[in-house]
Image (cartoon, rainbow, N blue to C red):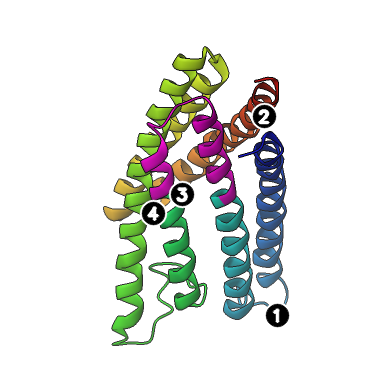
Amino acid sequence: MSSAMVRTGGILVFFLILAVLVTGIMLAGAAVGAGGAGGTGRPDPAGFGAMLVLMTAVYNGVMTFVYWTTKGLFNAFSYTRADFPILTLMTALALNLLLTLLGGGNLPATGAAPAGGGGLGVLDALSFGVVLAMLAAWIWFSVAAIGFGAQVGSLLWRAIGIVYLAASGLVAIALALLASGSGAAFGMLALFAGAVMLGGWVCHGIGLIVGAKEMART
């Protein structure tokens, strides 16, 4: 893989961060607007679902490319311990997009399914399984990133792995709270986990850009 491709992966991370922030603002605006005069108190399900599907497609596409270029960077320095977790993450992202498309953008446990409709419940169960697989692979990748940093002497990649480990731990706790029915606690912890993950994305993007420069020198 060329250093230019790895650099592109790093740049796309910042594009993704911007896209996530803009989409979050748009969704928040839709929710506020729905509660206004004559509003129903919730966003239009069709519009919300379409936006969620679009955001999922963009996120999964960009992150798949980012993980692929990360693998290329690691392999360029003869580091292969992250190959399997990265490939697992890429596969999970593809499955997540497929399940989102099949579900029409409905969020799990929204009560949007008609009575007796078991199809959505099956999709929710599959989605949760994919999330758990992605979380396990993400933890594995985080440990591998720390190992890569140790091999090449990069404090940045060690920091990336540590931040991702912290984020994955928070996500695991949030999922446990969700499974136990603690919706309010889940929401607060999920927001905090998202902030930590955002910091990891920033470090990841910088790591790819800096790594691309090191690749060009070798």
Q: Residues within 10 Å of mark 3 (few under 14, many from 20)?
A: some
Q: Nearer the viewer, mark 2 or mark 4?
A: 2
Q: Residue at x 54, y 37 (%)?
A: 72
User: Residue 44, percent across and down?
Assistant: 62, 77
* Circles 4 and 1: CB atoms closer than 8 Å: no
- Which residue bears the numbered disc 3? 187
* Circles 4 and 3: CB atoms closer than 8 Å: yes
Distance, label 4 to label 1, CA atoms, is: 28 Å
SS label for mark 4: helix
Q: Which of marks 1 and 3 is in front?
A: 3
- Which residue bears the numbered disc 2? 212
Q: Earlier in the sequence, mark 2 or mark 4?
A: 4
Q: Which image quarter holds the N terminus?
A: top right
Q: Is residue 87 left or right of residue 119?
A: right
Q: Residue 38 carries which label?
A: 1
In reply to whether residue 35 is colored magenta, the answer given is no
Q: Which mark is residue 183?
A: 4
Specify the amino acid type for callout 1: Gly
Specify the amino acid type for callout 4: Gly
Distance, label 2 to label 3, CA atoms, is: 37 Å
Specify the amino acid type for callout 3: Gly
